[in-house]
């Protein structure tokens, strides 16, 4: 990225439909589309912009959007800004979704860390829109995400793939059929009227994709650590679900207690944050634990010990 800044400068100067277009963006989008197994991809400056673009461009007046109640705020806001009718369904329980509707979900949920049943969702035949923020780079045989891991690509309309999590950079790609990406380029206001990202971002994401391809042990290690910590917490009597999602919520309940426990853990050297309403439902304040590849079993054992001590 530093080399790209020296070569291309720090800014893009305008929107991509004007002076902000660069060959590096086009090349990166083509590479990402191949990575996801789609015809095309379009890069946005943030995941928030990408979700707003998708949900305010494709659904129109007279359409219906079915949205999980625990979707990320950017999905919620995109649904609210759409002219379509919105149906908010209980978490992971959409009921019957008609074929002529849109179904919007995360694949790995950002706060609960649980996983949407995309295999079931694609059976509805609805236009399935999937946010892969916490899946891309981690799931799939090449890190493509949950859609690829369960071979659900034929049932997904478009996916949103932020590059600020496992890819470690910024922005997001919308991946899907060529006509849909062309439509976004021409109609999505968050794309048309946003200054393009700094060109050096493209070089950084390109390098991230190299790492994902060359070092699969990184994602395997993260998922192993997630299983390890979940098992250790369960053994200690702390209720967590099994699985290998890197996001592990520990429900505390009361807001002040969650903040106090997080502060005690921070004092002990653990970077753990308390998540409170309105981010989560009232009465479910929690610690949001997130795995990363540089942790070790010894660190996780110490964390469980400290957590048990402050719980008592």
Image (cartoon, helix red, strand yellow):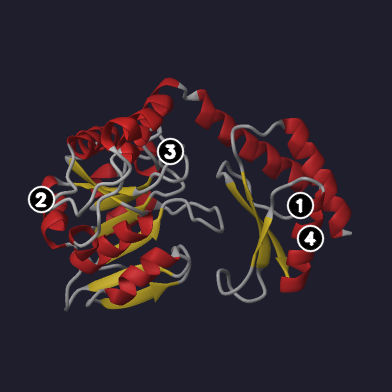
Decide which of 277, 229 is in the foreground and name it: 277
Which residue corresponds to mark 2?
179
Residue shown at the point (20%, 53%) measured from the top left: 14
Q: Which of marks 4 and 1 is nearer the N terminus?
A: 4
Decide which of 16, 187 is in the foreground and name it: 16
At label 1, counting other C-alpha atoms closer than 10 Å, the crowd grade (few under 14, some 14-19, many 20 or more) is few
- CB within 8 Å, label 3 to label 4: no
Question: Rounded to the nearest whole Å, what is the CA distance between mark 1 and mark 3?
Answer: 26 Å
Question: Rounded to the nearest whole Å, what is the CA distance between mark 3 and mark 2?
Answer: 26 Å
Residue shown at the point (25%, 49%) measured from the top left: 155
- CB within 8 Å, label 4 to label 2: no
Whether residue 226 is situated above or below residue 6 in the rendered picture = below
Disc on res. 167: 3
* Nearer to us: label 4 or label 2: 4
Question: Rounded to the nearest whole Å, what is the CA distance between mark 4 and mark 2?
Answer: 50 Å
* SS at circle 3: loop
Q: Which of marks 3 and 2 is nearer the N terminus?
A: 3
> Is residue 51 shown left or right of residue 293?
left
Q: Earlier in the sequence, mark 2 or mark 1?
A: 2
Residue 267 in view (yes/no)? yes
Residue 94 in view (yes/no)? no
At label 4, counting other C-alpha atoms closer than 10 Å, the crowd grade (few under 14, some 14-19, many 20 or more) is many
Disc on res. 261: 4
At label 3, counting other C-alpha atoms closer than 10 Å, the crowd grade (few under 14, some 14-19, many 20 or more) is many
Q: Which of marks 3 and 4 is nearer the N terminus?
A: 3
- CB within 8 Å, label 2 to label 1: no
């Amino acid at each position: 990225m530093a080399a790209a800044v020296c070569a291309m400068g720090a800014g893009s100067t305008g929107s991509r439909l004007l002076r902000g277009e660069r060959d590096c963006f086009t090349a990166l989008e083509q590479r990402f589309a191949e990575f996801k197994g789609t015809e095309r991809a379009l890069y946005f400056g943030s995941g928030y912009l990408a979700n707003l673009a998708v949900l305010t461009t494709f659904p129109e007046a007279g359409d219906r959007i079915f949205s999980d109640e625990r979707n990320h705020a950017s999905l919620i806001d995109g649904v609210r800004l759409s002219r379509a009718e919105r149906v908010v369904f209980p978490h992971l329980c959409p009921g019957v979704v008609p074929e002529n509707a849109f179904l919007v979900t995360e694949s790995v949920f950002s706060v609960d860390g649980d996983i949407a049943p995309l295999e079931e969702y694609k059976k509805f035949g609805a236009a399935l829109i999937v946010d892969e923020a916490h899946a891309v780079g981690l799931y799939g045989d090449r890190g493509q995400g949950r859609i690829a891991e369960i071979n659900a690509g034929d049932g997904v309309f478009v996916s949103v793939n932020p590059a600020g999590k496992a890819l470690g950079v910024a922005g997001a790609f919308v991946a899907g059929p060529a006509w849909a990406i062309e439509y976004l380029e021409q109609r999505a206001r968050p794309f048309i009227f946003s200054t393009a990202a700094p060109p050096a971002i493209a070089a950084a994401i390109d390098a991230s994709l190299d790492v994902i391809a060359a070092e699969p042990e990184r994602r395997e290690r993260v998922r192993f650590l997630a299983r390890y910590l979940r098992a250790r917490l369960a053994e200690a009597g702390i209720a967590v679900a099994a699985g290998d999602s890197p996001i592990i919520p520990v429900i505390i309940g009361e807001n002040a207690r969650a903040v106090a426990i997080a502060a005690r853990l921070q004092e002990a050297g653990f970077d753990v944050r308390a998540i409170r309403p309105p981010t989560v439902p009232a009465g479910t304040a929690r610690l949001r634990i997130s795995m990363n590849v540089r942790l070790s079993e010894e660190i996780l054992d110490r964390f469980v010990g400290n957590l048990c001590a402050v719980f008592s």
